[in-house]
């Protein structure tokens, strides 16, 4: 039987990843305990774990709230990704990936396209992380993998997919297919260029959306 804290963690995590608990929403221990039918102790432990995951921030004497990012924060995050991940993709292409890894990447692309069609954005974000992680792992640079983990935030990825229209989703899925093709061809210049385009497209789209949302809030 799952521990109460594990149950609380999974439920609250899904609320955040699905967007039911949006950026900046407060997650009070008492309110969450009542919602989940649990005591405050397992909820407190779950919130601490979510804080460690980077999904919530704990506020002194004020409980927790879902993390939020300003356009400036997003620029910094995507700027770092735009430096690290294209380098990793080029290095992976140069080293060459095994047929097994390339087949795994093909499978991830197929699953992502299905999740995109179903608009299952938490699952899509999870698969996206697996694909990007496999490419970075293929670079053979363990320090790079550690650096990338510090700048990829699951809620940002999920939120980006959730905001995409059909055209943007197709473009993103197409980037993944082209990236795998570049890796299969062992072409580092191509792989680097595709990853650059992929990250920049996501950054431009998300930052524009956040700016529009902040402008709309200011008019209320």
Image: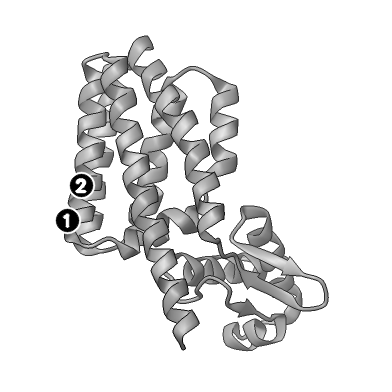
Local secondary structure at mark 2: helix
Left or right: 90, with 84 as reference point: left
Marks 2 and 1, Cα distance to the nearest angstrom?
A: 6 Å
Q: Give the x, y percent position of residue 130.
A: 40, 40
- Above-or-below relation of 89 to 216: above
Q: Which mark is residue 167?
A: 1
Mark 1, secondary structure of its residue: helix
Question: Can you say whether 86 is above or below 92 in the image?
Answer: below
User: Going 56% across and 39% down the picture, which residue do you hit?
Assistant: 149
Q: Would you say 47 lies left or right of 59 here?
A: left
* Res. 114 visible in picture: no
Please give left or right for residue 94 compared with residue 79 in the image: left
Image marks 2 and 1: residues in contact by CB distance under 8 Å:
yes
Residue at position x 52%, y 51% in the image: 153
User: Where is residue 163, by image quadrant?
Assistant: bottom left
- Is residue 54 found left or right of 184 in the rendered image? right
Q: Quadrant of the N terminus?
A: bottom right
Q: Residue at x 19, y 41 (%)?
A: 174
Q: Nearer the viewer, residue 21 or 199?
A: 199
Return the mark for residue 171: 2
The residue depicted at 39 percent of the width and 70 percent of the height is: 212
Q: Is 160 drawn above or below residue 98 in the view shown?
A: below
Q: Which mark is residue 94?
A: none
Q: Position of residue 24 (x, y in %)?
A: 58, 73
Q: Position of residue 85 (x, y in %)?
A: 44, 31
Q: Position of residue 17 (x, y in %)?
A: 46, 64
């Amino acid at each position: 039987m799952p521990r109460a804290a594990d149950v609380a963690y999974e439920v609250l995590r899904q609320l955040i990843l699905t967007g039911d608990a949006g950026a900046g929403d407060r997650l009070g221990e008492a309110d969450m305990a009542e919602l989940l039918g649990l005591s405050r102790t397992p909820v407190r432990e779950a919130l601490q774990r979510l804080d460690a995951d980077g999904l919530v921030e704990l506020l002194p004497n004020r409980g927790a709230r879902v993390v939020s990012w300003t356009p400036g924060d997003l620029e910094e995050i995507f700027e770092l990704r735009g430096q690290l991940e294209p380098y990793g993709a080029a290095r992976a292409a140069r080293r060459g990936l095994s047929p097994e890894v390339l087949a795994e990447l093909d499978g991830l692309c197929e699953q992502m396209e299905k999740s995109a069609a179903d608009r299952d954005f938490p699952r899509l974000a999870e698969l996206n992380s697996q694909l990007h992680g496999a490419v970075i792992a293929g670079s053979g640079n363990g320090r790079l993998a550690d650096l990338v983990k510090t700048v990829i935030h699951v809620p940002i990825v999920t939120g980006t997919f959730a905001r995409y229209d059909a055209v943007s989703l197709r473009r993103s899925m197409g980037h993944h297919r082209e990236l795998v093709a570049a890796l299969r061809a062992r072409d580092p210049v191509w792989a680097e260029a595709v990853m650059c385009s992929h990250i920049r497209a996501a950054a431009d789209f998300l930052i524009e959306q956040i700016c529009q949302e902040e402008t709309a809030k200011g008019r209320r």
